[in-house]
Amino acid sequence: MKTVAFIGLGNMGGPMAANLVKANYVVKGFDLSEQAKEQARKDGIEVVDNVDEAVAASDAIITMLPAGKHLLSVYEVTLKAAKPGSLFIDCSTVDVDSSRTAHDAAEKAGMLSLDAPVSGGVGGATAGTLTFMAGGTKEAFDKAHELLDVMGGKIVHCGGAGNGQAAKICNNMILGISMIASSEAFNLAEKLGLDHQALFDVASTSSGQCWSINTYCPVPGPVPTSPANNDYAPGFAAALMLKDLKLSQDAAKSAGVSTPLGSHAEELYQSFNDAGGSGIDFSGIINHLKGSK
Ligand code: NAD
């Protein structure tokens, strides 16, 4: 594969596409935002005005879009324009149903398709160290590997169509719940006269240990790289955590699965977002919880 179409050159897609350019791929990029296009040009991406043109000239088509409705509207156009047998890779985080609908449409149009949402944020996208969770056939996965390898550090094949999205929302449901649990523990410790560092030293090496404490501790001090030490600048914004929790709860409803803590985490992140937290790192919920009755 030499030429790649990249649709959605925002905070994540922009640096991912730039890494493909650095690895000597010809990248034809498309976005609706002037700001995204301008940055992409600076990064060596051939920005095109017509998405059909980009897709028809490419062997692989990568999308990095806000939500399922954007994905389906882009696929409606691009599946008609692409060469038969082209590889469609969707890296956006979208609902499982839209992802599976997109896979079906791609398959009917004679294309290979993969859902490959990511974890690792803008830092991982820039450094080329994202984790990809992929769903689709082995053929599509094997073919996509060389591209994902340029943009990521870890690539996991999670099974058939939509399973990458399923893995992503299950993981982030754990993360949302565990960040709330960690925050509640630090808030309680504070009131009981227990030092942040002392709780960290115990919990990070005991049965309470988890990523939300060990790597992304929600209080300033114990983990110097955590957003708590940078006034809770994201990182991973609370708006995106709320998006992923909503996707997990939609999926739980449609699969008939009981997820009471996932549902409560969604309510708490909704309340944090409503109170003005949407642009704050998701670990900033610790301060919102202090104010909740
Ligand atoms: P973003 O809003 O910065 O970028 C999305 C881009 O898509 C925008 O530039 C927008 O103009 C473009 N777009 C929208 N509709 C389009 C269309 N029809 N045609 C072409 N371009 C279109 O968002 P982002 O932070 O880059 O996130 C992208 C995806 O990655 C989302 O699904 C998000 O949930 C997921 N994600 C984000 C992060 C993160 O930390 N930002 C981490 C993991 C996953």
Image (cartoon, rainbow, N blue to C red):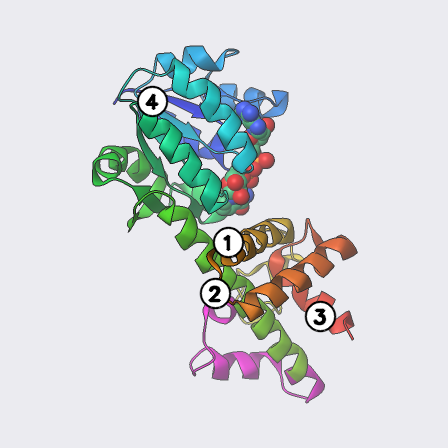
Between marks 2 and 1 in the image, the one whose residue lies nearer the viewer = 1
Residue assigned mark 3: 289
> How many residues crowd mark 1 within 10 Å: few (<14), some (14–19), many (20+)?
few
> How many residues crowd mark 2 within 10 Å: few (<14), some (14–19), many (20+)?
some
Residue 6 placement: quadrant: top left
Q: Amino acid at mark 1?
A: Ser
Residue assigned mark 4: 109
Between marks 4 and 2 in the image, the one whose residue lies nearer the viewer = 4
Residue assigned mark 1: 254
Residue in view at x 51 percent, y 23 percent: 40
Of marks 1 and 3, which one's residue comes earlier in the chain? 1
Of marks 4 and 1, which one's residue comes earlier in the chain? 4
Give the extent of the magenta segment: 189-214
Q: What separation in Å lies between label 4 and label 1 (alpha carbons)?
A: 27 Å
Residue 215 shows which numbered tag?
2
Which quadrant is the C terminus positioned in? bottom right
Evaluate if marks 2 and 3 touch, with contact meaning CB atoms under 8 Å apart.
no
Evaluate if marks 2 and 1 touch, with contact meaning CB atoms under 8 Å apart.
no
Q: What separation in Å lies between label 2 and label 3 (alpha carbons)?
A: 20 Å
Q: What separation in Å lies between label 4 and label 3 (alpha carbons)?
A: 49 Å
Q: Amino acid at mark 3?
A: Leu
Residue 223 is left or right of residue 83, and the answer is: right
In this rendered view, identify the residue nearer to me: 45 or 82: 82
Q: Does residue 98 appear anywhere in the picture?
A: yes
Label 3: which secondary element: helix
